[in-house]
Amino acid sequence: MSSATSQAQARSDAPSKLQKISAASANKGMKRFLWSFWVLLGPGFLAALADNDAGGVISYTATGVQFGIGLFVPLVLCLSVLTFTVQEMSMRLSAVTQEGFSRLARRRYGRFWGLYHVTTLAFENLLTLMTEFIGMSAGLAMLGIPMWAADLLCLIFVISFVVFTGYYTKERIALVIGGLNIVFLVVAAMTHPSLAILGKAFATWNVPASLRGGVIWFVIATVGNAIAPWMIFFQGSGAIDKGVSAREIRLGRIDTAFGCLMQAVIAAAIIVCGASLYGHLHNVASLSPADIIGGLRQTVGRLGATLFGIGLFDAGFLAAITVSLSSSWSIAELFGWSNSLNDKVRQAPKFYAIYAGSLVMAAAAILIPHMPLNLISIVTQVIGGVLMTPLLIFLVVMTSDKELMGPYRTKWWGRIWGWAMVGLLIALTFATLLQTVLQA
């Protein structure tokens, strides 16, 4: 048996999804199905749903305000295929090798590439975490809490997540938090979107002629939000921590596919919420979350605006957890430190120090006076799209490696699709740089 094949059959000490589902076999009928589905959900669902983070919510809403439904509602639904492809490769790579992305990159391509990946990830994650605190603080500010106090409360809430014991408990809590994203569907319904306009959007993918000059910037921001760099590290390391091995790849794909579907539907709903303000708000780049919530109060009433604020807080809360964990996992894995959520703080002090430290820096940064908070939210998504290209190249190469993956390597058609995604991201990156130069 080859080393790759034997690695593929290896199992972690943590209980696997398959073992948990088998333990529920005493139940019958619908109860058994619901319990099995609940146990199945995990890293794939969380990584996908956390893509609709606070920065993403602000960016999607601003996109709806700027362009209406037009191009972007059908675009985010189509991007779910792109999101699934990237997350599936990350899950499969870690399930087979039982190693995180940064450690694999270092072992196979040298120390430089391992350090490059964690350094760029840490930079992107810090910007992303700033957008999470922007969103969470804006949500709490609706209750009349001062900005500094809301920021501090958000920091305490997210750091307190680590006090719970064991990966499974923490994962279930995160899933409940993620489930609250459903409020965006409620608010979208409250805007009473026209079915005729939605149908026309899918038929024409139209952007008003007067706005086409700036559309590329928003397209790459949308792509950057759909396939953010941190999700590769979170999904892979989360799968290992949960105990997913090569034998659970099919279950991991179901978990990932459901998450990607829900992420796309909720993202589309957020754009619909923003589209209700199309033509009512101007200077989109300078709009704050408070401006957006205030605008929604005029279109969907106080209840709808409050629900949107709750969703914004919830999106930031979930993403702050997952983004911080992606930094902790990747850095700790690279240097060989303890890095499991099954460990208590005293058992993995460096792992949890990275988690808390990144949160403290982001929470402090948003209190700097005159920070262009909404612009940071959009720019972060663009930077994510740019940084995603080298990560995706490594992901496609490693999952196509027969020596590393054995019988679980990507099939020929999957490799073609993977390289097509790389080409798309490179093209969008150059288009963004060109537009930036022309507008300078």
Image (tube, rainbow, N blue to C red):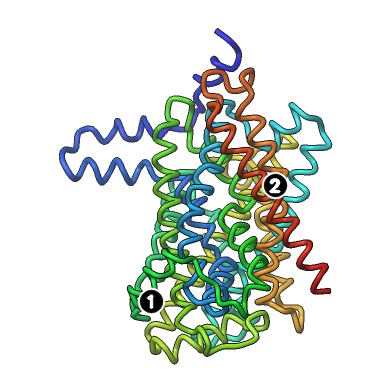
Q: Amino acid at mark 1?
A: Val
Who's the residue at 35% across and 42% down the image?
A: 39
Please indicate, yes or no, whether residue 101 appears anywhere in the rendered image: yes
Q: Which mark lies nearer to you, 1 or 2?
A: 2
As helix, strand or loop, the secondary structure at mark 2 comes to helix
Who's the residue at 52% across and 23% down the image?
A: 408
Where does the image place residue 347, in percent across and percent down from the top left? 63, 41
For disc 2, the marked residue is 389
Question: In the rendered image of this protein, does residue 345 appear above or below residue 336?
Answer: below
Where does the image place residue 144, in percent across and percent down from the top left? 53, 89
Quarter of the view holding residue 103:
top right
Where does the image place residue 97, in percent across and percent down from the top left? 59, 26
As helix, strand or loop, the secondary structure at mark 1 comes to helix
For disc 1, the marked residue is 187
Q: Amino acid at mark 2?
A: Thr
Where does the image place residue 212, in percent across and percent down from the top left? 63, 73
Q: Nearer the viewer, residue 132 or 77?
A: 77
Question: Which numbered circle lies on residue 432?
Answer: none
Please indicate, yes or no, whether residue 155 appears anywhere in the rendered image: no
